[in-house]
Amino acid sequence: MQNSICTNVISFKGGATVDQAKPCSDLLVIELTIRSIDIARVLIDTGSSVDIIFKDTLEKMKIDPSEIVENPSPLVGLSGEATIAFGSINLAVKAGTMTKVLEFLVVDRPASYNVIMGTPWLNSIRAIPSTYHLCLKFPTLNRIKVIWGNPRVSQINALIEIASPKNKREVQRLTGRVAALNRFISRSTDKCLPFYDILRGDKKFEWSEESEYAFQQLKRYLATPPVLAKPVKGEPLILNIAVSATAVNGVLIMEERSEQKLIFYISKTLLDAESRYPLMEKLAYAVVTSARKLRLYFQSHTIVILTTFPLLTILHSPIQSGRLAKWAVELSEYDIEYRPRTSSKSQVLADFLVELPPGTVTNKEPNSTWFLHVDGSSSKQGSCIGIRLTSPTSEILEQSFRLGFHASNNEAEYETLIAELRLAHGLKIRNIHAYCDSQLVASQYSVKYEARDERMDAYLKLVQNLAQEFDCFSLTRIPRSENFQADALAALASSSDPGLERVIPVEFIEHPSIEPPIVINLIRDQDDDVDEVARQPDERSEQSDYGYDTPWLETIRAYITDGKLPPKKWAAGKIRTQAARYVTVNGEIYKWKLSGPLMTCLEGEMVRNVMEEVHSGSCGNHSGGRSLAVKMKRHRYYGPTMIGDCKKFARKCEKSQRHAPTIRQPAEVLSSITSPHGVPYEIVTNNGSQFISTRFEAFCEKRKIRLNKSTPRYIHNAMAKPRQSIRPF
C-alpha cells in the first residue's frame, strides 16, 4: 500500500526549468490524441469548467456533423460577454496510456487554438498542470506521466492569425513577432526582406504583391514549424553557414544515431558596407555572427563548421585585412573545427542550403581564373613595368616596378611577365590568364617566333619554367589601346619620385631575372675564426640553458596547415588561441605584429645564430640582454623566450664582460658602525660574547681603537633602604 502511494506522488523540480527564460509567462499548450487523430494547439485552461472544441477543428477531423447533439447553451467569460455553444459531442481523448470519453461543447467562432481542455478532463485523470514548468503531470498504473508544453505555439498562432498589414505600424508589429521566432525560421531575414524594404526610409506605405506573397509564404512555413532538439552535454555540434546578397545565415544542428536534428537558426541583415564585403569575408562574418548569437553553445560544445571553402586558411592568411585578423582572434577562444561539407542527411539542412537564390548561392566553387594585364617600357627616365591583377570576384591588385638596370623594351616586357608570374605564385594562384601588348613576347611564348638572341632565349626559358608551376596558364596579345591601365602603372613607376609615399606601391628590381643571384661572402679575421672554433664545444654544451631549445612551432604549424590538435582539450584550446596570431607563408611561420610587417618565428639553432649576428656581428655593439631583444624585434624576429635568452647570452659574452664598466656599487646595502665624526678613539662595551671575541679584539687593534670592557652598576634606592649609607663622591 505504501509503495502504491509513493509511486503516485507528483512533484515538480526546479531543474526542469534550466533551459527556460525567467520569468516564464507562456501559456500551457500541448498535443493530444482525440478520436485517434493527433491534435496540436490544445490549450490547458484551469479556469474553464467545460471542455471546448471548435467547429473548424471538427471539420478538419472530418467528423460527421450528425454526431453533434444540438443543445444551445451560453458560455460566460470574465468580461461578462456570452458565447453560445450550439451543441455537444462525445469524443475519446487519449493521453499516454490513459483514454477517457469526454463531452465537448462545440463553439462556432475563429480561435487560435483547436481545443480548450478545462477542469472536467483534468479531474478525470487527476492531472496537475504547471505553467511555470510548462508541463502537465498525471499518475498512471506504473509511473507518473509527463506531457510537455510547446511555449512558442501561442506566438506562432498569433502570427498565423494576423491579417495583412494596412500601415507601417502593423508592419512593425509583424517584424517584431517574426524576430521573436527567429530560431524557428530558416533564413528569416531573406523571407522578411520585403517587409524591411517597406520600413526603410521615409516613404509612403505600399503593400505590394511581392509583400503579400512573402507574407503568405511565411504563414505557410509557420503552419508546420520545425521541432528543435536539445543538445547533449559534451557532444559536438555542427554549424552550416550560407550567405546571400542581403544577409548571412546559419543553422546549428546535432547528430544523434546518424540523424541530424535542428537546434537553432540564426540570420542577420547585412548593412550597406557589409554587403560589399568579398565572398570569403562574408562567410567569415557568418561564422562570427553565429558565435556572437550562440555564445553559450560555442562555449559549451565543440563546433564543427562544414563548408566547401578554405575558411581556416583565409583566417590565417598573411594578406588578410584588419577585419579578418580581428575575427580570427575573436574566434580563437572557441573550440572550432573546419571540415569539408559532405552529402546532407537532414531535410531541414537540405532546405536551408537549397532555398538560397541561384544567383547568390555560395556553396558552388566560383571561376578560379585570375586575369593579369602587364606592360613594360624603357625610356630616358629608366625602365619600368606595370601589373594589374584581377581576381575571379573582381578584386583588383595593382603594382609598379622600376628596374635598377638598363633594359630594352623587349627585356622590360619579359621582366614584367616574370614579375607577374612570381607574384601570382606567391598568392597561391593556380589558374591565370595573362594579357600583354608585346607581339614579340606573345609570339615567342606561343612558338610563332624563334628566340635567336641569347638574352631573349634565356628570358623565354625562365617564363616557360615559371608557367609550369600553374595548373593553367595562357598568354594573349592585346592591342595597346586595351592595355591602357597597365601602361599607366608603368608610366607611374618611371615618372614618380622614389621617396614619395603613394597608394600604389612602386618596387625596385635591382638585377635582371636571367642573371645568377649575387652571393656575398663575409671574410673574417683568421684569429677570430680560430677563437670561434676553439670555444664552440663549450657554447654548444650550454645550449640547454636557453629557452629556444624547446620546440614550439610544430604544433602551431600542424594546426594552421592540417587542422591537427593535441588530444587534451585544454592543450587544444591553447593552440587555437595562439594560432590566431600566426600565419604561414611558403611553409614558414610568421607572427602578426600590432602594426608593421610580419615577424619571422625562430627556434633552435637559428635563434643563436641571429643573436650572435645582432650582438657581435656586422655593426654589432655588444649590447645588453634587453637591448639585444629589442634590436632583434626591430629586425622582424620573434621567439616566446627571446628576452630571457638574450639576457643569458649577453651575460656569457666574454668581450662584453671584459670591456664593461666596473660596478662599484656593493651587492648589499652597508650599514656604518662608526660615529658621524669618523673612526672612534675608544669603544666601551659590556661582556657580551660578540664583543669579547678574538676577532673583534683584532679588529679594534688593527684600527687602533681602545677597547674597554665594563660591568654595569646600579645605585640602590635610599628611600627603599634607609639604613644603607651612601658614600659621597
Image: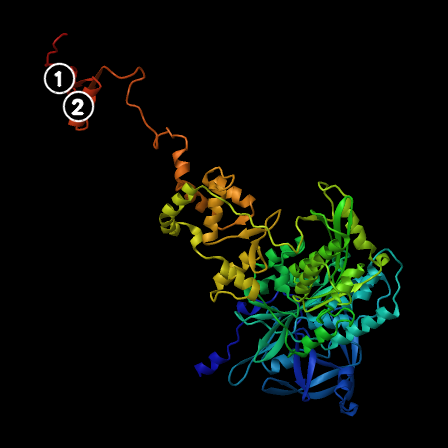
Q: Is residue 112 visible?
A: no
Residue 705 placement, left or right of 315: left
Please tell me which of labels 2 and 1 falls first in the chain: 2
Q: Which mark is residue 721?
A: 1
Residue 697, label in figure: 2
Residue at x 46%, y 38% (from the top left corner) = 622
Q: How many marks?
A: 2
- Three-letter residue code for mark 2: Glu
Question: Is residue 99 shown above or below 156?
Answer: below
Residue 300 in sight here: yes
Does residue 521 lie above or below 299 as drawn? above
Question: Relative to 414, is 130 on the left or the right?
Answer: left
Q: Position of residue 587 (x, y in %)?
A: 56, 60
Circle 2 residues within 10 Å: few <14, some 14–19, many ≥20: some
Labelled disc at residue 157: none
Q: Circles 2 and 1: CB distance less than 8 Å? A: no
Q: Is residue 697 above or below residue 726?
A: below
Q: Residue furthest top?
A: 729
